[in-house]
Amino acid sequence: MWPKKFWLLGILFLGAVLRFYKLDWGEGNFFHPDEYHIAGAVSRLSFPSQMNPHLFTYGSFTVYLIYFTRLILAAFNLKIFNLDPILLGRFYSAFFSTLTIAVVFLISKKLISKLDAGAIKNNFGPYLAALLAALTPGLVQQAHFATPESTLTFWLLATLYLVLNWHEQKKNKISLPSSRLFGPGFGHQSCRRLIFTDLDYSLSKPAPTV
């Protein structure tokens, strides 16, 4: 049997394969309407004279991320994905969705250790949680779209993990990075801002005693 330290790597590899496989699905036809809106917003940008995407259904983080990625790749004459904004957006969705698996593992490990600090060594819960995240059809599906959902999920869970650490240690070196993660989260979808506001409010509350 593989040592436990390789289990998470194996789960991450499985999740990455499922998410990065066939990112160019559709044979050149992009059927998700939101992908067209985001690609259109990217095409309207021109640094530094015109940086208004004229798209506010979503936040602007994804649009700017794709645009500046294209700019950097073009500067180095790298034709990755032919600099197609939709395919670059799908890459970032798959990338952040894969990172989300690791964050799910860390959150599960943190919560289980709070319940029973001595049992975490032999506990399979964090690995099972990571495996379920890797195999969840909805997460795999969203990772194949150039939309903000996969990226937003990563920022939200990463913030939650840091908040849990802050409640445990009460150190500014944890609360400050957690607050910094609110920025990308706020820059995704305005309808999700209440979630980040709730997490921000929790930073001001005293840690619960168990």
Image (cartoon, grey):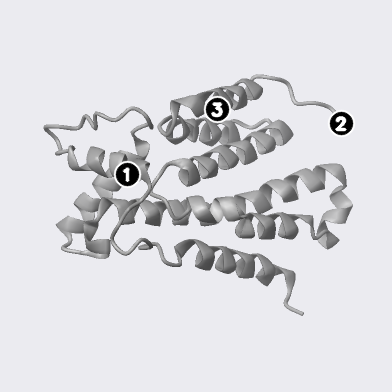
As shown in the figure, which amino acid type bears the numbered disc 2? Val
Measured from the top left, where is residue 27 in percent x and y?
A: 32, 64
As shown in the figure, which amino acid type bears the numbered disc 1? Leu
Measured from the top left, where is residue 113 in percent x and y?
A: 80, 47
| Residue sitting nearer the eye, 143 or 197 | 143
Look at the image and tell me in which quarter the C terminus lies. Answer: top right
Give whichever of discs 2 and 1 has the lower sequence position. Answer: 1
Classify residue 184 by image quadrant.
top left
Foreground disc of the pair 2, 1: 1
In the image, residue 51 sits, relative to residue 145, either above or below, namely above
Measuring 51% from the left and 68% from the top, which residue is drawn there?
A: 17
Residue matched to label 1: 65
- Asked whether the beta carbons under mark 3 and mark 1 sit within 8 Å of each other, the answer is no
Residue 134: which disc? none
Measured from the top left, where is residue 176 in percent x and y?
A: 53, 31
Q: Dot 2, crowdedness within 10 Å: few (<14), some or many (≥20)?
A: few
Q: Is residue 19 left or right of residue 1?
A: left
Mark 2: which secondary structure?
loop
As shown in the figure, which amino acid type bears the numbered disc 3? Phe
Question: How many discs mark residues in the rendered view?
Answer: 3
Q: Report if residue 64 is visible in the image.
A: no
Residue 210: which disc? 2
Foreground disc of the pair 2, 3: 3
**Cα gap from disc 3 to disc 1, whole angstroms:** 20 Å
In the image, residue 105 sits, relative to residue 12, either above or below, namely above
Residue matched to label 3: 196
Please identify the residue farthest to the bottom as the structure is shown: 1
Classify residue 39 by image quadrant.
top left
Measuring 29% from the left and 39% from the top, which residue is drawn there?
A: 37
